[in-house]
């Protein structure tokens, strides 16, 4: 009986694995078609060039984490004179070995904006999470709070090495925006800005609205006349 139970469990795991591969191939094919329709280039991922891309973005907190990372279904293009990269990104830390450590995996669709209109101090904005808050505290980062916006400070953990410049760009309009939207993840540094929802892979049909949402965030921090950055 135990033998058949073990075989059944093995068959289930194999089935789930195969379905995952098939769904991944279907998503990649659909994203390739979407990239073509948007006049974006498309790269399947898991190549030396993709590793080089992640290293080139290591000035941004999301791509500077100490665990293993990967990127695939990478779309490159230009929208409104802004360089845009859209990718599926995975980050994992810890291990499943006998040491007792657990392996934490986060997978999300990420947009990276790069433009001369961005002149940002290095900052990291994450939804409040006990594990993240403890890890950043251990690294010596202090949560930047705003007495005028307790709802924002309750929802988000914001940190960076230059507190005053960060406070300057998180003005009234920016704070009010994030209070209303909730659970967004944003990193900024120099001419680069990332946008995602941690642990959320965006459905192919939702990529265009997701990009529009990302540009809303980009406009909050851009140096265009009439904007607040």
Image: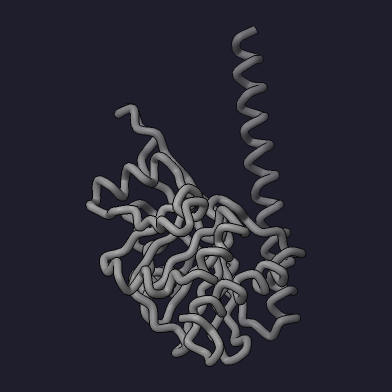
Residue 98 is drawn in which quadrant?
top left
Q: Position of residue 131 (x, y in %)?
A: 39, 40
Does 176 sit above or below residue 113? above
Q: Position of residue 77 (x, y in %)?
A: 60, 84
In the picture as drawn, the residue positioned furthest to the top comes out as 1
Q: Position of residue 22 (x, y in %)?
A: 70, 51
| Foreground of the two, 20 or 8 | 20
Does 105 sit above or below residue 190? above
| Foreground of the two, 176 or 92 | 176
Q: Is residue 11 left or right of residue 217?
A: right
Quarter containing the N terminus: top right
Q: Is residue 153 left or right of residue 180?
A: left
| Foreground of the two, 138 or 207 | 138
Q: Position of residue 63 (x, y in %)?
A: 39, 63
| Foreground of the two, 33 or 83 | 83
Q: Is residue 64 left or right of residue 193?
A: left
In the picture as drawn, the residue positioned furthest to the front comes out as 148
Q: What residue sits 62% from the left and 89% below the top?
A: 80
Q: What residue sits 47% from the left and 87% below the top?
A: 223
Q: What residue sits 67% from the left and 64% below the top?
A: 28
Can see residue 108?
no
Q: How is the image coloured?
A: one colour
Does 2 sit above or below residue 193? above
Residue 59 is drawn in which quadrant?
bottom left
Can see residue 185?
yes
Q: What residue sits 41% from the left and 82% below the top?
A: 191
């Amino acid at each position: 009986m135990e033998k058949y139970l073990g075989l059944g469990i093995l068959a289930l795991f194999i089935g789930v694995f195969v379905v995952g591969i098939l769904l991944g191939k279907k998503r990649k094919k659909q994203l390739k078609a979407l990239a073509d329709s948007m006049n974006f280039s498309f790269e399947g991922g898991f190549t030396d060039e993709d590793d080089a891309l992640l290293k080139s973005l290591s000035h941004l907190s999301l791509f500077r984490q100490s665990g293993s990372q990967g990127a695939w279904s990478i779309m490159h293009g230009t929208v409104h004179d802004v360089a845009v990269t859209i990718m599926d990104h995975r980050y994992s830390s810890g291990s499943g070995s006998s040491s007792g450590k657990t392996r934490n995996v986060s997978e999300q669709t990420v947009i990276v904006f790069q433009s001369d209109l961005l002149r940002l101090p290095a900052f990291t904005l994450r939804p409040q999470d006990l594990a993240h808050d403890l890890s950043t505290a251990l690294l010596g980062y202090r949560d930047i709070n705003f007495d005028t916006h307790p709802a924002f400070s309750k929802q988000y953990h914001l940190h960076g090495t230059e507190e005053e410049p960060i406070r300057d760009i998180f003005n009234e309009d920016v704070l009010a925006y994030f209070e209303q939207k909730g659970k967004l993840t944003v990193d900024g540094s120099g001419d680069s800005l990332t946008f995602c929802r941690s642990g959320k892979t965006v459905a192919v049909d939702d990529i265009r609205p997701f990009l529009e949402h990302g540009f809303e965030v980009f406009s909050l921090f851009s140096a265009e006349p009439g904007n607040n950055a």
